Image: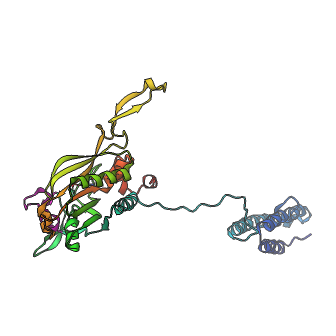
């Protein structure tokens, strides 16, 4: 007896090729590889082959079997990718598409802009590469001020401007105050300037590039109560309605009087104390421990004050007729305060385990 393995192979391939759905392919698989399928029936016929040819035919049948298995697997993959209603198993869970998340800084910028827009503040973005004159001189900072040192500020190589001096990477968003006064020429001014700032620092709370948001309000009869009201509104909207603010005397060249703003700690609600249950869990057994985030009940938000008359003059605004307030806060810092982030460098680590939590 003879077995034409080449011809059997042709038949098997035809079967596989013509199976146009997964269910047809499974039927084909049984017909070819099942107990009573083609391959087994060929193997059963081996005993009828003359002994000299039996070995070669056996090898050929086994090779055919391997080829059929490979072809069927490939076709299975192809058919399960193909979308047609015969192949869809509607009971299977869907394949979820991986989506990215917005960066926490981007989320905070959107939230902050929206909070201040409700108070009538316009969002502005002023240059990251700034002139020394705008970043310092117009802000009442003397030539000898230490912030102008290259230890504190990054200078850009190039020809200095005849009037505006050297080019720098802006160390704060406060030059936006002057640019906004120049742009509008006349109050009322309500601006929120959000941008990147640069200072050569690198530790758990400082990065060489960071973001600030600068508020500026100039009009007739503007006083500290308006500043306190705006800060309270921001703190409650951004950190939560129970958040309190307080002003502490401070010094900035461009504001008089100047303050540091604190908010009540978001972790211990301003008490400075965290309650920790002992194992028994009864309220009498509560331990009182110092809040590790604030230690005192307050967290420092940033600098603020009433715009210095010299700054209004630099901006072309009459300080007799108008007054104003300004503040400048770090965006990385407010997010750290809101969520208890303990290392600013996480924002720029590219670590998805951190970034995708926001
Ligand atoms: C200023 O930059 C003032 N221009 C703020 C200001 C504006 C005061 C208007 C009064 C009126 P200060 O240097 O404190 O102030 O910076 C403000 C905030 O920026 C800090 O509280 C901090 O949150 C953030 N900041 C400063 N340096 C860095 C840094 N290297 N990395 C991250 N955040 C920083």
User: In which image quadrant can residue 104 be found?
Assistant: bottom left
Image location of residue 276, percent across then percent down: 42, 31
Q: Please state which of residues 165 and 185 is positioned toward the viewer in this rendering.
A: 185
Seen at 27% across and 52% down, the residue is 206
Image location of residue 300, percent across then percent down: 27, 47
Image location of residue 329, percent across then percent down: 27, 55
User: In which image quadrant can residue 234 be found?
Assistant: bottom left
Image location of residue 222, percent across then percent down: 21, 59
Q: Please state which of residues 106 and 45 is positioned toward the viewer in this rendering.
A: 106
Q: Is residue 148 left or right of residue 80?
A: left
Q: Is residue 175 left or right of residue 290?
A: left
222 in relation to 288, above or below: below
Residue 140 belongs to magenta span: yes
* Part of the protein shown in magenta: 131-151
105 in relation to 249, above or below: below
Quadrant location, the N terminus: bottom right
């Amino acid at each position: 007896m003879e077995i034409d393995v080449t011809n059997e192979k042709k038949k098997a391939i035809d079967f596989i090729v013509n199976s146009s759905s997964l269910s047809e392919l499974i039927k084909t698989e049984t017909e070819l590889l099942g107990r009573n399928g083609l391959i087994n029936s060929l193997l059963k016929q081996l005993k009828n082959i003359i002994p000299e040819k039996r070995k070669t035919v056996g090898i050929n049948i086994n090779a055919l079997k391997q080829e059929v298995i490979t072809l069927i697997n490939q076709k299975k993959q192809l058919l399960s990718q193909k979308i047609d209603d015969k192949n869809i198993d509607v009971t299977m869970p869907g394949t979820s598409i991986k989506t990215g998340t917005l960066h926490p800084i981007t989320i905070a910028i959107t939230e902050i802009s929206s909070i201040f827009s409700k108070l009538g503040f316009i969002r502005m973005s002023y240059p990251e590469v700034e002139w020394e004159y705008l970043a310092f001189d117009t802000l009442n900072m003397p030539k000898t001020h230490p912030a102008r040192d290259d230890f504190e500020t990054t200078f850009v190589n190039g020809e200095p401007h005849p009037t505006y001096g050297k080019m720098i990477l802006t160390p704060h968003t406060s030059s936006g105050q002057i640019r906004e006064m120049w742009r509008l020429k006349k109050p009322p001014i309500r601006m929120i300037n959000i941008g990147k700032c640069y200072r050569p620092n690198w530790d758990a709370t400082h990065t060489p590039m960071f973001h600030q948001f600068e508020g500026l309000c100039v009009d007739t009869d503007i006083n500290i109560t308006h500043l306190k009201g705006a800060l309270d509104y921001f703190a409650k909207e951004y950190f939560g309605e129970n958040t309190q603010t307080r002003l502490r005397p401070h010094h900035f060249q461009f504001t008089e009087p100047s303050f540091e703003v604190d908010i009540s700690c978001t972790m211990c609600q301003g008490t400075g104390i965290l309650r920790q249950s002992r194992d028994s869990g009864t309220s009498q057994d509560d331990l009182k421990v110092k809040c590790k985030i604030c230690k005192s009940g307050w967290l420092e938000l940033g600098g603020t004050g009433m715009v210095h008359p010299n700054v209004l003059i630099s901006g072309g605004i009459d300080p007799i007729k108008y007054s104003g307030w300004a503040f400048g806060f770090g965006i990385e810092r407010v997010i750290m305060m809101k969520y208890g982030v303990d290392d600013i460098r996480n924002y720029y680590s590219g670590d998805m385990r951190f970034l995708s939590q926001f």
